[in-house]
Amino acid sequence: MGKFNDKIEAEFDPPRKWILSRALSYQWDYNADVDEDSLKAIGLPVDQHEIVVNEGFVTDLASVPRMCWAFIAPWDVARAAIIHDLLYKTIRMYRRQCSKCLKNSEDPVLIHDAKAASDNIFLLGMKDAEPPVPKWKMYAAYYSVRMFGRWSIIPRKEN
């Protein structure tokens, strides 16, 4: 069973962003199905099955369309979503860096593996959340990022 270091402490930055006022970390169980090597290969500092999101990180908590909030509100999965936001941002930064090389050196298998590891950590984080996330919400959120998250790892102008 994994654990978060604490509750979220963040300040609202209108219209849709939040800025962490202190670091948030998540450490998952050693037996979890997470490909840490792919995360390290894209530049994420993973140490002893732990990811740290630094103070000042900007997040939207969870990219859930407002019309779906009755089913899955961003605050239901917020801590896991913040960790997931950092993971996807790291994948985008890696892809942008690769696109600036003389040869497009992006490794599609590495991108696939890093995304899968990121999504698995999101699921693990929801499983370890307090208060507990209902299973149906957990799996609805997980399968949403598995199916639609590929657009979120495409490099954008803002990050």
Image (cartoon, grey):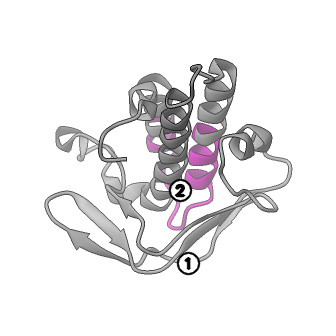
User: How many residues crowd mark 1 within 10 Å: few (<14), some (14–19), many (20+)?
Assistant: few
Q: Return the mark for residue 39.
A: none
**Spot occupied by residue 5 in the image (x, y as percentages of width and height):** 62, 75
- Vertical position of residue 7 compared to residue 110: above or below: below
Q: Is residue 3 magenta?
A: no
Give the dominant element type of the magenta stretch: helix, strand or loop. helix
**Spot occupied by residue 79 in the image (x, y as percentages of width and height):** 48, 62
Toward the front, the furthest residue is 102
Q: Say what secondary structure mark 1 lies in.
A: loop
Position of 146 compared to 121: left or right?
left
The span picked out in magenta is 119-140
- Closer to us: 4 or 134: 4
Q: Is residue 134 magenta?
A: yes
Q: Is residue 70 visible?
A: yes
Position of 144 compared to 43: left or right?
left
**Spot occupied by residue 99 in the image (x, y as percentages of width and height):** 50, 27
- Closer to us: 86 or 133: 86
Position of 128 compared to 20: left or right?
right
What residue type is disc 1 on? Answer: Asp
User: How many residues crowd mark 2 within 10 Å: few (<14), some (14–19), many (20+)?
Assistant: many
**Spot occupied by residue 11 in the image (x, y as percentages of width and height):** 29, 76
Location of mark 1 (residue): 6
Position of 37 compared to 45: left or right?
right
Q: Earlier in the sequence, mark 1 or mark 2?
A: 1
What residue type is disc 2 on? Answer: Ile
Q: Residue at x 50, y 66 (%)?
A: 131
Location of mark 2 (residue): 83
Q: Is residue 33 visible?
A: no
Q: Quadrant of residue 156?
A: top left
Q: CA distance from mark 1 to mark 2?
A: 13 Å
- Vertical position of residue 16 compared to residue 41: above or below: below
